[in-house]
Image (tube, helix red, strand yellow):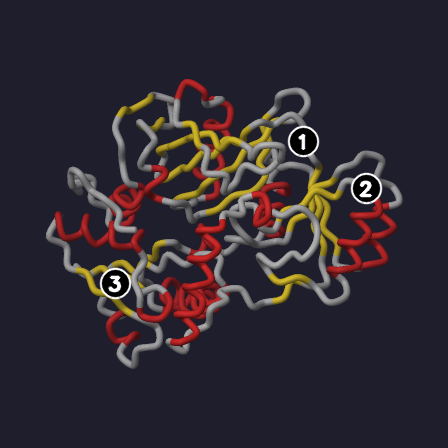
Amino acid sequence: MLVTIHKDRYDRFDPFCEIFEKILDYNNIPHMRVDASDIDFWDNVKKSDLFIYRWIQWDDHLQIAKNIMPIVEYQLGIPCLPDQRTSWHYDDKIKQYYMLHLKGYPFIDTWVFYDRKKALEWLDTVQEYPLVFKLKGGAASYNVLLAKSKKSATRLINKMFSEGITSNNISFGKTTKEVDFNIKKFVRHQGGNLLRKWRGEDAEPFWQLNKNYVLFQKFLPGNKFDTRIYVVGGRALAFRRMVRKNDFRASGSGNNDFNPDMIDKRCIKIALQISEEMQFQAMAYDFLFDEKGEPFIAEISYASIGRILNKCPGYWDKDLNFFEGHNWIQYFQLKDALKMPDLKQPENLVENS
């Protein structure tokens, strides 16, 4: 048996994937780091029994994943983490809305337009503001704004159907970059960018332009948190993410509540049902509540931060039985993908920062 794991950008390795390696080492399962830029990449991948590439929302990652993942899974027939069912819609809120809405799952009302004129015509019919504007990709609420009036919504539409917007680079409105601004983090980030440029690396992971579409969601007022349910192989981990002070966005706030008694079980049931019916290997669901207190999905993502989910004090099964214990989602993923029910999780496992 051999597990191959793709490296991160610029020949570095993702700390998330180091947890995979530590679990594999503990269970004496051979593994190898690979890189699609290496001449022997395909020769090594063809030897593997499982291929892992934890690609995230960076454009470099997206470019590589779209080129290699379907080939590994469909042409070579090698099991992948993530597989195509789980990842084809990743970091694309438009695809997620189409997919879940058409299946009848509770997704927040969303409007998507590919024509400026039709978007503006629809705007003339809107009776309630604010609206939530989102780019189709992005994390930590960086690409989410509140359009508080028809004027601000019109400006966003015109922007998207003219010069467009790159991810994490919205130049107007109150973004989470402003809300979360920290001088130490800013200096460290800028210093890192200078170092990357000195090494001849691209300092900006987002370079694709968002243009000629616009996405709005219904604003659900009164939510002081969202509920993230992470389902992996019929197990549901959950925690609440508190919104920022004087803001409406929870993702990336860093203020999390891991008390399982505070989790609305309806969210767990919905997430477990979708993952089973859609055959997702692993999926995070972000829930908000409408005016009647009914849960609705804002977006989904196969990629989640392992060290945060490790803080969850347990997980629920399909019958909503709760099993106490701190677990790494990488352990559950390997256990399922390798079909090894006896796979062991090392004690005192720590993710390197």
Counting from the top left corner in percent of width and height, residue 277 is at 47, 39
Q: Alpha-carbon distance for marks 1 and 3?
A: 43 Å
Q: Which of the numbered marks, if any, corresponds to residue 333?
A: none
Name the residue beneath numbered marker 1: 220
Q: Residue 243's quadrant in the figure?
A: top right
Q: Alpha-carbon distance for marks 2 and 1?
A: 16 Å
Counting from the top left corner in percent of width and height, residue 321 is at 34, 21
Residue drawn at the location 79% of the way across and 48% of the way down: 152
Residue count near mark 3 (Cα–Cα under 10 Å), binned few <14, some 14–19, many ≥20: many
Counting from the top left corner in percent of width and height, residue 95 is at 59, 52
Q: Nearer the viewer, residue 233 or 246?
A: 246
Quick one: SS at disc 2? Answer: loop
Q: Which of the numbered marks, if any, corresponds to residue 4?
A: 3
Q: Is residue 286 left or right of residue 316?
A: right
Name the residue beneath numbered marker 2: 149
Name of the residue lying farthest toward the bottom: 39
Residue count near mark 1 (Cα–Cα under 10 Å), binned few <14, some 14–19, many ≥20: some
Quick one: SS at disc 3? Answer: strand
Q: Amino acid at mark 2?
A: Ser
Q: Amino acid at mark 3?
A: Thr
Counting from the top left corner in percent of width and height, residue 155 is at 80, 54
First in sequence: mark 2 vs mark 3 = 3
Q: Nearer the viewer, residue 97 or 340?
A: 97
Please identify, in this view, whether the residue under mark 2 or under mark 1 is nearer the observer.
2
Is the residue 58 above or below the residue 321 in the image?
below
Q: Quadrant of the N terminus?
A: bottom left
Residue count near mark 2 (Cα–Cα under 10 Å), binned few <14, some 14–19, many ≥20: few
Q: Amino acid at mark 1?
A: Leu
Residue drawn at the location 67% of the way across and 20% of the way down: 292
Is the residue 181 above or below the residue 190 in the image?
above
Q: Are marks 2 and 1 in contact (CB under 8 Å)?
A: no
Q: Residue 67's quadrant in the figure?
A: bottom left
